[in-house]
Image (cartoon, rainbow, N blue to C red):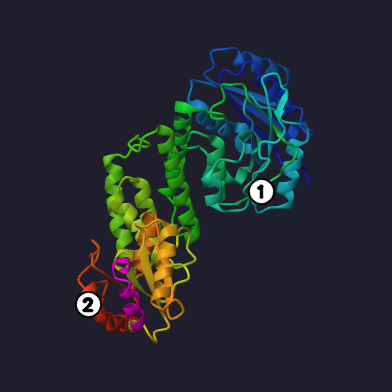
Amino acid sequence: MSLPSVAVLIAAYEAEPFVGQAVRSALAQDYPADRLHVVVVDDGSTDGTAAVVQQLVDEQPERLTLIRQENRGSVGAVSRAAAAPAALEADLLAILDADDAWPAGKIAAQVQLLAERPEVGLVYGDMAVIDAAGTVVQSSWLAGETPPQGRSISRFLTQNLVTGSSIVVRGELRDRLFPIPVEMAWADWWLAARTAQHAEIAYNPLPRTLYRFHGTNMSLGAQGPARLRELRRGLALQRWFLRRLGIEQPVEELERCWDAFARLAAEAREAAGTPFAALMEVTAQDADVARGLTEEARAAISDDPHRALALALNAAAANPFDATARAALNAARATLGPDAVGPQPLRGARAIVLALDADDVVRDPTLLRAAAELVDGLDDVTIAIDAQSFDPAEAADRISALAAEQGIEDAVDLALVTGPLDELGAARLAHGIALRVSTRRPQEAGPASASHPTWLPLADLPAARDLLLSRRAAPPA
């Protein structure tokens, strides 16, 4: 059987010193000459980039295509290359940046992997970093990393470890991958995350692509304002996917994708030096979409938590500044149980949780004994002491000492909740508590009733046993 045809896509801008080596490294692959074609898009260069490529076209016109266009950016140039006739007819599409180069055997090794693993839609590899003169300054870019593989979109959305010039994708995915949305800043990150929605991704460590670091690269080594710019671009890419993920993704994938977005936003705020930095634009239409999706998510929580989670995720991504949308997302995540992703302030607790405030317990240590007597014989109840306002170590020492003083350390299942809790942790704590007894009425508490008790004033502690027993018969949704 003949080997698959390969189209090499090169986006070139002001690349006169390097583009010749990039093209030659592709043409020199130990791969049949009639099965590999290079498409170079000169993206409005003002230097001699096009002239260098044209000279190579004149030498091997049957193996090389040059397309010239006004400047549209690297992503636009890659999309234009993917639309060239040679690319539309190719079995495989390979990415090569105009300032990088391929070692011998690179394409052959990846083609072999794809032949052996038909479930793989994209294969990528490691890179060696070289300087402007071609000297290796770092032999392995991914040393110490665990390069992601498989079909988990959260792995590929968390960070961009799929190095662009190492990518080869199957042509049968082209309609799902191209054209790349104009708001994407990187072709490689887009291709990896998008492919993970439709096929497996594999990592092939050798041979390593030669990545040229010459001081004007788009993102490598960016600092200060340039780093903040790159972080914002990353948020835009993640947000694009989060607005579109649905119940076809497993629950834990939806959770991890949101957490990756939240971590990158926190990193961007830190880079900006202020929590008030404008990290992304939210239009009036985005806000309207978020409100509508939030209402749908709330309505679905009790009947279809998976759908509610997806809708709330879409809402919070549409408007990350909408506290109501984030609250709906956290409420959906709070229903997922102890194996869900993220903080679990009540992990290991029994089915029914009675909460007391640490402030109340410290002021009146006999409250612990009264609560223990209250739940005597109820082996499915945990007493949780909410000590979020305390130093964790101090809270552990003081509550342990008080439990020992009252002689209840072995009589009840006692849990200590310390802070700080983020929005999700607070939502899971509130969801997991069957009854809170305290001197302070929580803002979110509804009126206490036999059908849905959530809070009792401390003076009504004796009534708590009946309410806990009612929860045994009708546990909270």
Lower position in the chain sequence, tag 2 or tag 1: 1
Span of residues in magenta: 361-373
Give the residue drawn at x 32%, y 84%. Answer: 469
Toward the left, the furthest residue is 447
Horizontal side of residue 220 vs 235, given as left or right: right
Is the C terminus in the top left, top right, bottom left or bottom right quadrant? bottom left
Q: Is residue 400 above or below residue 211?
A: below
Asked which secondary structure carries label 2, the reply is: helix
- The foreground one among 289 and 381 is 381
Does the magenta stretch mainly form a helix, a strand or a loop? helix
Q: Position of residue 375 (x, y in %)?
A: 36, 82
Per the image, is 137 magenta? no
Looking at this view, is 34 or 359 the one in front? 359
| Residue under pointer 1 | 202
- Disc 1 marks a residue whose amino acid type is Ala
Q: Residue 258, image x and y in percent?
A: 44, 51
Q: Are marks 2 and 1 in contact (CB under 8 Å)?
A: no
* Residue 229 position in % (x across, y down): 44, 30
- The residue tagged 2 is 460
Residue lying at 60% horizontally and 12% vertically, measured from the top left: 48
